[in-house]
């Protein structure tokens, strides 16, 4: 069924060149496992797990049934001054897979809300300790932290910021860690660039540790085109933050839930932040949800400071929504039963090798990978350089493959149930598309 002109006009699509899309709409109709199906019945192999979120594959029976059961029993319940069982149950299950130092979970509805929540918790925490001047945030160039005002402010993707000149005050950005002259085609973590963390010391010297609340980074930057942290870099950030009483926030909206071969990137790298933001794979994307994990030090500081009143004036109508919690519990069970985090680790070598095999194409200028994530960066194209990424995306789609593009980088992050045969199909189709488009 075609969409009418009025329907097309009615829907303002997010992060989309609406003119381009509406000229030739690509409409998905159903999904199962590793595949989408289009309106015309064409199968599309999903090499990006939706938007880095459908980690267990699409329409998983257990998750769908859990949501169906819950919606019949209790569609909604408030979480302000009231509670329901499954929110507590889900929080505990999440704590069990979070790094050991994070014992408390605050529910949100998206990654963006998780980031804004984490920033507010950081401010409230310092205030509860009597450190009222610790209010500045440090983000990182090329970082992506969603589209709320907080996340956009600490984010470092230029195009996402330029239309909104008045963002949060008091945000400083670290340099990104991408050093192509030294690290191109690194398999896994690049060797060079640990010293990029020293820029944090310069910022602290300039602004004063007493004025800085928190540093927020993605352990592996996803949306900017997959930037893997250099060996020792995250460790260095951790050390500097601890030494200067600055909270370290890892935005694990993409890297959580098995993407890097462990429950969270923090567990993989063995670098433990004070706060973790999560979303996406938390419910396998079946129902929107996000969450923020914090240390007992943070939770207790607020809890003990405020007696007979609310300790954190923050929350959302849908915090801990029963359907999301039901989906989340079932999702964690699927991850556990199918050992999907381990599966992601065990496929890393095969996936990474297949990605790096593309280095034989002379239009590929860098390949970056870790876990089940890869970024393939292409050289500039003389003809229509601005549309290179999307031309490859369209070519892949026509050929039954869903990839993501950001600038000249093609990002891959398949569901963790992907098979080796499907990995072969992904890279064969992508190679074909790259050759055709150049
Ligand atoms: N943080 C990171 C690292 C992300 O990759 C994203 C989305 O891709 C977000 C935050 C925002 O999440 P959402 O789109 O659910 O608001």
Image (cartoon, rainbow, N blue to C red):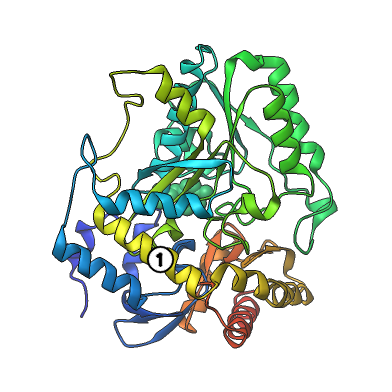
11 relative to 394 in the view: left or right: left
**Quarter placement of the C terminus:** bottom right
Residue for point 60% across, 78% down: 430
Q: Nearer the viewer, residue 255 or 65?
A: 65
Q: Is residue 198 above or below residue 414?
A: above
Q: How many marks?
A: 1
Residue 22 drawn at (x, y percent): 31, 66
Would residue 422 be visible to someone looking at this image? Answer: yes
Q: Nearer the viewer, residue 237 or 366?
A: 237
**Quarter placement of the N terminus:** bottom left
Within 10 Å of disc 1 (Cα), the crowding (few <14, some 14-19, many 20+) is many
The quadrant where residue 176 appears: top right
Circle 1 SS class: helix
Residue 411 drawn at (x, y percent): 58, 64
Q: Nearer the viewer, residue 319 or 155?
A: 319
Residue for point 64% across, 52% down: 267
Residue 118 drawn at (x, y percent): 46, 35
Label 1 beta carbon within 8 A of ligand 1: no
Q: Nearer the viewer, residue 121 or 191?
A: 121
Residue 299 drawn at (x, y percent): 46, 30
> What residue did someone put label 1 on?
331
Would residue 378 be visible to someone looking at this image? Answer: no
267 relative to 58 in the view: left or right: right
Residue for point 53% across, 20% down: 170
Q: Is residue 313 above or below residue 151?
A: above
Residue for point 72% across, 44% down: 177
């Amino acid at each position: 069924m075609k969409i009418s002109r009025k329907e097309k006009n009615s829907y303002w699509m997010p992060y989309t060149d609406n003119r381009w899309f509406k000229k030739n709409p690509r409409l998905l109709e159903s999904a199962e496992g590793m595949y989408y199906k289009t309106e015309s019945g064409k199968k599309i192999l999903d090499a990006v797990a939706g938007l880095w979120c459908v980690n267990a594959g699409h329409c998983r029976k257990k998750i769908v049934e859990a949501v169906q059961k819950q919606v019949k029993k209790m569609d909604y319940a408030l979480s302000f001054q009231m509670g329901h069982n499954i929110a507590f149950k889900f929080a505990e299950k999440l704590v069990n897979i979070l790094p050991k130092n994070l014992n408390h979970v605050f529910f949100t509805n998206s990654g963006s809300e998780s980031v804004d929540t984490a920033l507010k918790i950081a401010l409230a925490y310092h205030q509860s300790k009597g450190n009222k001047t610790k209010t500045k945030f440090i983000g990182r160039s090329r970082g992506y932290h969603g589209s709320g005002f907080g996340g956009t402010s600490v984010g470092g993707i230029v195009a996402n910021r330029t239309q909104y000149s008045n963002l949060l005050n008091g945000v400083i950005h670290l340099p990104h860690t991408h050093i192509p002259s030294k690290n191109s085609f690194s398999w896994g973590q690049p060797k060079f660039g640990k010293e990029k963390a020293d820029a944090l010391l310069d910022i602290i010297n300039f602004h004063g540790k007493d004025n800085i609340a928190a540093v927020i980074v993605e352990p592996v930057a996803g949306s900017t085109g997959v930037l893997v942290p250099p060996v020792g870099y995250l460790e260095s950030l951790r050390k500097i933050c601890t030494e200067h009483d600055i909270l370290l926030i890892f935005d694990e909206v993409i890297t959580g839930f098995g993407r890097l071969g462990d429950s969270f990137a923090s567990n993989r790298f063995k670098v433990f932040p004070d706060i973790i933001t999560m979303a996406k794979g938390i419910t396998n994307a079946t129902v929107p949800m996000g969450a923020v994990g914090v240390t007992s030090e943070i939770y207790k500081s607020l809890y003990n400071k405020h007696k007979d009143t609310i300790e954190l004036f923050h929350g959302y109508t849908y915090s801990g929504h029963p359907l999301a919690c039901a989906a989340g519990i079932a999702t964690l069970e699927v991850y556990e039963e199918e050992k999907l985090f381990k599966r992601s680790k065990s496929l890393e070598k095969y996936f990474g090798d297949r990605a790096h095999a593309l280095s034989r194409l002379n239009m590929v200028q860098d390949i970056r990978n870790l876990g089940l994530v890869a970024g393939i960066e292409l050289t500039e194209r003389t003809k229509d350089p601005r549309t290179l990424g999307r031309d490859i995306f369209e070519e892949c789609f026509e050929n039954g493959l869903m990839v993501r593009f950001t600038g000249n980088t093609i990002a891959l992050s398949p569901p963790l149930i992907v098979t080796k045969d499907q990995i072969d199909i992904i890279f064969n189709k992508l190679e074909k598309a790259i050759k055709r488009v150049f």
